[in-house]
Amino acid sequence: MTYEQIIKKYAPLLREVTHIPSKEVEILLLFLLEKNPIWLHLNYKNECSCEEALAKLVKKRATDFPIEYLTNRASFYGESFIVKENVLIPRPETEILVEKAESVLKEIENPKVLEIGVGSGIISVMLATLIPNIKIMAVDINDDALNLATLNAKKFGVEDKITFLKSDLFENIADEQFDMCISNPPYIKNDFKLPKNVTYEPKNALFGGVEGDELLKKIVDDTVERKIKYLYCEMGFDQKVRLERYIKEYKPKSCEFYKDYEKLDRGFCVEFNISKVE
Ligand SMILES: C[S@@+](CC[C@H](N)C(=O)[O-])C[C@H]1O[C@@H](n2cnc3c(N)ncnc32)[C@H](O)[C@@H]1O
């Protein structure tokens, strides 16, 4: 069978799990063949050499298993990141958090940043790529995440700018100065029923507590206690009211909430008034 015929044969099996079944079969083929889309277009009429392997991948994808875990890659900020099972798959809305952080960090000379919950490393690696003299401490409780983030840092040549550390929130972080704490922590309510595809991702990257915002509040407290000036975080679309009230107790200099690409509340950028929160 030719590649064209193979794509037609397997696409219907993915109709229930994606709006772009043919495209996804192509992505899986390209992954197996280690080729690019142009190659495939030039070779549509040639014999397919990997039907058996493709059939296996399609079968797994048809269970709603994320395509990023099958191909071990995900795109973020226009770049291709390595992705592995047991570590959260990057989400496009996190690009907004990176953009917002970049705009303040580029104005600081030799900025020092702390990331809580580094996951695959997308935030720290992108900031390290975008900002020349930055130094980042990136922590996670998940060893697989720390290993993957280290791989991504090496892939982008920024491993010298990032220190990776296993830590439950701020627990193992020495008493050093940071200009910014940044985090996309788990923020989903513990009893929320996840869509099937998301159930394949690690629970400790998703669930933030009974209300969902418990870890976020702890990060707010710890950031203030450590006298870190800026706190930039992603949050759940329904958490603005409670978090705004919570943050304002600390009388910050400024506190801006932002929306994601779907126009849902998705995060906040706080500048603390360090001298007043002692
Ligand atoms: C929503 S994921 C975000 C990952 C990555 N920063 C991103 O934006 O894709 C949250 C991450 O926080 C980590 N995490 C969960 N609880 C933590 C804790 N108490 N201390 C440090 N990291 C934690 C998880 O292992 C996971 O990698």
Image (cartoon, grey):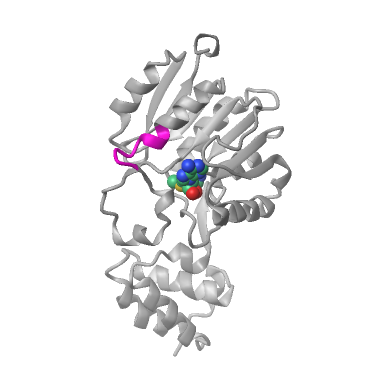
Residue 164 lies in the magenta stretch: no
Q: Nearer the viewer, residue 243 or 171?
A: 171
Q: Nearer the viewer, residue 3 or 185?
A: 185
Residue 174 appears anywhere in the view? yes
Q: Nearer the viewer, residue 146 or 17?
A: 146
Residue at (65% x, 42% y) in the render: 129
Residue at (54% x, 14% y) in the render: 274
Whether residue 253 sits left or right of residue 124 in the image: it is: left
The image shows residue 1, relative to residue 65, as above or below, that is below
Q: Which residues are magenta?
A: 209-216
Quadrant of the rendered structure where residue 239 is? top left
Whether residue 209 sits left or right of residue 158 in the image: it is: left
Image coordinates for residue 189, horizontal then vertical, percent: 30, 43
Quadrant location of the N terminus in the rendered image? bottom left
Image coordinates for residue 32, horizontal then vertical, percent: 54, 76
Residue 41 appears anywhere in the view? no
The image shows residue 136, relative to residue 37, as above or below, that is above
The image shows residue 124, relative to residue 6, as above or below, that is above
Image coordinates for residue 89, horizontal then vertical, percent: 46, 55
| Extreme-front residue of the structure | 171
Quadrant of the rendered structure where residue 105 is? top right
